[in-house]
Image: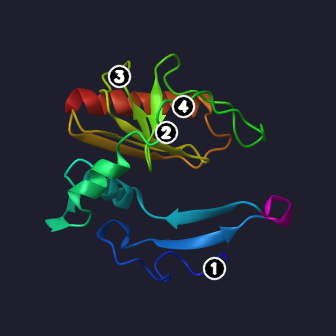
Amino acid sequence: MFDPRTPRQRPSLDHQFLKRGYSTRYEAPSSYNHLITIVYFVEAADSLTFAQLFLNDGRADGRQVLKPETVKLVTQNAIGTLDVRLFKTSVPAYSKGAEFFPGMVKKWGLGFMISTTAAPGGRSADSLAWAGLGNTYFWIDPAHGVAGVILMQVIPFADGKALALFGSLRRRCTRLS
């Protein structure tokens, strides 16, 4: 159910990386009654703190938030010999088809897409990534010790200009690391 309170009024989870956010279940319209998704409302800084957990063996702000074993479990291949391929759209008004790093073998962990080899622009093998419908992206590159978040709220997903901006940010951050 949607919570109409402003983000500052909503109850927060007891995790450092979600202190200013909230989690709620959203029931899709009856025509999509088989879908249930979790929606998080957080600020970019919270998303970066979350990403840093995976650069620091589960530590954030001097506290152990996740066990190192959990970090390892979440960031390893969870789909075996299957590969991530083109994401085909079923609703073109909201999402374009997308394939991140075409031709490169990619896997899914329990929370992230995993690059299995180095990618153009300096992204390392074993880098992690996630994307959301509104052209929200984050990536975690443990080899370079860098993570980044960009939240655009632009439809359709995988918009060419949004992807170009995300790629530029990622390359610049990697060069700075």
Residue at x 34% of width, y 34% of height = 127
The residue labelled by disc 1 is 4
Distance in Å between CA atoms under marks 4 and 1: 36 Å
Label for residue 79? 2
Check disc 1 and give the amino acid type: Pro
Dots 2, 4 in contact, CB < 8 A = yes
Left or right: residue 69 compared with residue 80:
left
Check disc 3 and give the amino acid type: Thr
Q: Earlier in the sequence, mark 4 or mark 1?
A: 1
Query: Which of pointers 1 and 2 indicates the residue nearer the eye?
Result: 2
The residue labelled by disc 3 is 117
Query: Which of pointers 3 and 2 indicates the residue nearer the eye?
Result: 2
Question: Residue 62, image x and y in percent?
Answer: 13, 65
Residue 50, quarter of picture:
bottom left
Label for residue 84? 4
Q: Is residue 114 above or below residue 65?
A: above
